[in-house]
Amino acid sequence: MIFSGGGFRRTLFAAIALLAGMASAPAGSAPVEPVAVSARPITEFHIGHADKRFGPLEFVGGLEMTSPSRDFGALSAFRFLKAGSEFIGVADTGYWFFGTVARNADRRPVGIQNFRMQQMVDQSVQPIDEKWEVDAEGLAVKDGIATVGFERNHRVSQFRIDPQDMKAPFRQLDFLVPARELRQNRGFETVTHANANGQHQGGLVVVSEKSLDKSGNIYAAIIDGPRKGVFTVKRNDDFDITDGAFLPDGDLLLLERSFTMAGGLKMRLRRIYGESVEKGAVADGPVLLQADMGYQIDNMEGLDVWSRDDGALMVSLVSDDNHSILQRNLYLEFILHQD
């Protein structure tokens, strides 16, 4: 979504489509579909500038991904199954996706390999074509189980991970937040496991995109573990939450997105203090990074945190193109420095 000349009008139309949810789900496909993905390396995060450091974040590299497949795109959430390489994800059009990030000798991402997609199925193993039933937005992975947050038909469901044949969910979880408080298209965009050795002992935490309480804060909940309960996240400015993951020290890293007529499209990373993620609390924390369309961003929706083989703490982001020719599927990678 970086354009010159008449780019403002195209950007505006794309952003309006993004917010209105105008993209429609693609037609069903074979159970597992290999998808050819071309990837153009991104070497500058700040367009036209060589700087790599942005506060505590250091840009490593990125990819702009395209494919001839009509199903490719709408990438809402992903998690690495093997740190920095094999991944699983969900598209908000009702698809699972799997693949591998290819790297060069400097550990920078250079391509996507072995990408494939599978349409989500119901209990009778029939593909689900109704978008309101499979608007998958959040994803957590642990011990061979994928936990997915869906909006519109709000629910948090668990699936056994099998890249060759993903079945229907085997369990539905109580998400604790009263269903009447969840806005139709502003449900659980963040589904993540807390630290195994922390106060929530690996329990699941869910955060909505923009379901607000009477004080204007964002509904969230710890839905399992020893300290279950509803909390909220302080909503700062006009940013909505699109994903999150816990850091090794117990803080929660949130990915946020904003669009206004005056300010255009923006993304932000915010570090939420771990001790504020607690039943009845209002969680908050500092902004680590904010970027507008002078940077290589789009509709940033997916985030994962992982450790590189040299010990670096990594943050990876993906964007959702809404199947629009005016938007892009991006993969971005940063080192989060702790000094």
Image (cartoon, rainbow, N blue to C red):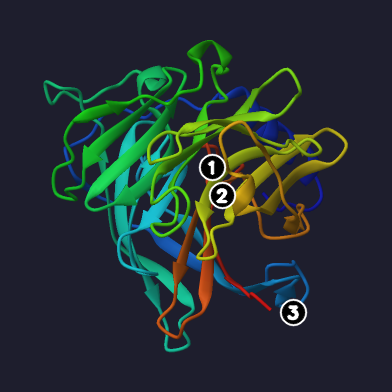
Q: Is residue 331 visible?
A: no
Of all residues shown, which one is farthest toward the bottom? Answer: 105
Q: CA distance from mark 2 to mark 1?
A: 5 Å
User: Which element carries disc 3, helix, strand or loop?
Assistant: loop
Q: Disc 2 designates what residue?
A: 328
| Left or right: 313 in relation to 309 | right
Which of marks 2 and 3 precedes in the sequence? 3
Tag on residue 182? none
Which of marks 3 and 1 precedes in the sequence? 3
2 and 1 marks in contact (CB < 8 Å): yes
Instruction: Residue type at mark 3: give it.
Output: Ala
Residue at x 19%, y 50% (from the top left corner):
163
Instruction: Residue type at mark 1: give it.
Output: Asp
User: Which element carries disc 1, helix, strand or loop?
Assistant: loop
Q: Which quadrant holds residue 291?
A: bottom right
Residue at x 55%, y 18% (from the top left corner):
182
Q: Disc 3 designates what residue?
A: 50
**In x, y percent, where is residue 140?**
38, 46
Of all residues shown, which one is farthest toward the right? Answer: 262
**In x, y percent, where is residue 76?**
47, 42
Rendered position, 242 above or below 338: above
Instruction: Residue type at mark 2: give it.
Output: Arg
Q: CA distance from mark 3 to mark 2?
A: 22 Å
Residue at x 40%, y 39% (from the top left corner):
91
Q: CA distance from mark 1 to mark 3?
A: 26 Å
Q: Disc 1 designates what residue?
A: 321
